Amino acid sequence: MHDLNKIFHIHSMEPADSLKLVKIREAAIAFAQVVLANTPPCADQDEAIRKVREAVWTANAAVAMSGC
């Protein structure tokens, strides 16, 4: 069963957790740059970038919630 209060709570973070978010974002930017440099502009490229963005948000949630 899901703990909805935990899922939808505004989570405070420790400084070390903020550093994790920076590392995740930096890696995502690097990967997105590779995608853009190696794929033609098209709907699939747009979708790939969207999925990288989605992965960042999901990873950030995992950090913020200290795991599921």
Image (tube, rainbow, N blue to C red):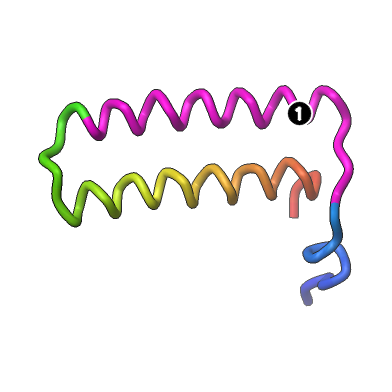
Q: Is residue 3 above or below residue 36?
A: below
Residue 20 highlighted magenta (yes or no): yes
Please provide percent x and percent y for residue 61.
69, 49
- Name the residue: 61% across, 44% down: 59
Q: Is residue 57 left or right of residue 3?
A: left
Mark 1 neighbour class, 10 Å CA radius: few under 14, some 14 to 19, many 20 or more: some
Q: Is residue 46 above or below residue 21?
A: below
Q: Is residue 2 above or below residue 38?
A: below
- Quarter of the figure with the C terminus: bottom right
Region rendered in magenta: 11-36
Q: Is residue 63 left or right of residue 4?
A: left
- Name the residue: 23% across, 33% down: 36
Please provide percent x and percent y for residue 45.
22, 47
- Which is nearer the eye, 1 or 16? 16
Q: Secondary structure at mark 1?
A: helix
- Quarter of the figure with the N terminus: bottom right
Tag 1 residue: 18
Please provide percent x and percent y for residue 31.
36, 29
Q: Main secondary structure of the magenta part?
A: helix
Residue 31 highlighted magenta (yes or no): yes
- Name the residue: 58% across, 48% down: 57
- Name the residue: 25% across, 34% down: 35
Please provide percent x and percent y for residue 64.
77, 45
Q: Residue extending furthest front?
A: 41
What is the count of numbered marks? 1
Q: Amino acid at mark 1?
A: Ser
Q: Is residue 58 left or right of residue 10?
A: left
Q: Residue extending furthest left?
A: 40
